Image (cartoon, rainbow, N blue to C red):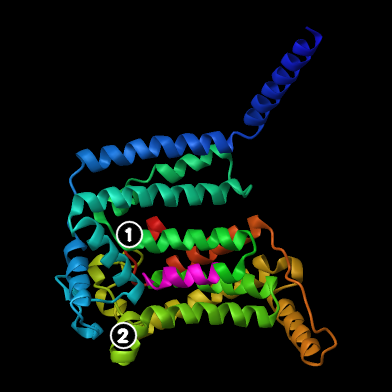
Amino acid sequence: MAAKSADIRKTSHRSNNFTQNIVKNPKLPFAIALLVADSILVALIIAYVPYTKIDWDAYMSQVTGFLEGERDYSNLKGDTGPLVYPAGFLYIYSAIQYVTGGQVYPAQILFGFLYIMDLAIVLFVYLKTNVVPWWALSLLSLSKRVHSIFVLRLFNDCFATTLLHAALVSIIFQKWHLGLVIFSGAVSIKMNVLLYAPPLLLLMVKAMDIIGVISALAGAALVQIVIGLPFILSHPASYISNAFNLGRVFIHFWSVNFKFVPEDIFVSKAFALSLLVAHLSLLLVFAHYRWCKHEGGLFAVVHAKVIQLKLRVTQRNPSSTNKVLQTDHIVTTMFVGNFIGIICARSLHYQFYSCE
């Protein structure tokens, strides 16, 4: 009897501790509840909300041309125009076409699972940080536009963003080389992910020595080469100019940030250059006064890395260890750096706001 009473007391004590932990830190159960509730919501949207036809037919036309053997990017076109995404997009949507037969409804189900996966990754990121209170996690599930982009529009932003968030998880766990490989995979689907590149580079410089940074960047570059290899070998100029066209200007009508700007100014090179200068200036200000504040500023970080490289070259310090960055610092730097890019972007669609 005494043993049973002791077991009961232990069980009751563990139960009380579990309840107290949930009360003190309700983030995890709240996140699980959000996932369950949002899964039901996504199923209802797919079942009862009409699909919005925008890019799906164009995607399928471009994929069909690729699968039929076309390797000249200038000849891969749809009803919305020529293909302007890197080759990772083609591989992803070729697989989707194979699985779904090019039909919208099964693709919506696939994108529904993708949405829940992305939400789970983002929730995990926020669970690892202390940047927002537990109730603020609900904001991740309240966006009508994000649900629409995933299961009613089937945009490639969905895959690019999910991979980006997966890369962020790898970086949180200090797996920099793996994170850069996944990040490069996201870029191969849609280039707007590159808005994260400046803060990511800064974090890499802070965390690793120069050799580590170079090797991680080389791994990311290798991913791009391998993914684009069929097109690089056959029509390199066409692939690079179409898939990585940094000077492309969207139609003024579809702009979000600067629709108030007259169209002749909007499409001008002077306006584009002014936004680029503003973007770089804001990044430098944040890097110096916020992201590198504890190290004495951006220039102090760069100076320290130069000294480290000199010591490594002269064999006085042949080995070095990576610096472990705080999760809150990584996440805040990445998201703020991306937001700076968003507000300075001339050609910006709604999904850039929503998915990023």
Badge 1 crowding class, 10 Å Cα cut-off, few under 14, some 14 to 19, many 20 or more, is some
Residue 128 lies, in percent from the top left, at 61, 49
Let me know if residue 99 appears in the view. yes
Badge 2 crowding class, 10 Å Cα cut-off, few under 14, some 14 to 19, many 20 or more, is some
Left or right: residue 243 versus residue 296 is left
Please, what is the three-letter code of the amino acid marked with disc 1?
Tyr
Picture quarter with the C terminus: bottom left
Label 2 residue SS? helix
Residue 285 lies, in percent from the top left, at 61, 72
Residue at position x 69%, y 63% from top? 325
Residue 276 lies, in percent from the top left, at 45, 79
Residue at position x 69%, y 58% from top? 326
Label 1 residue SS? helix
Residue at position x 77%, y 90% from top? 310
Q: Which residues are magenta?
A: 179-190
Left or right: residue 241 versus residue 1 is left
What residue is shown with label 1?
Answer: 350
Please, what is the three-letter code of the amino acid marked with disc 2?
Phe
Residue 291 lies, in percent from the top left, at 65, 66
What residue is shown with label 2?
Answer: 231
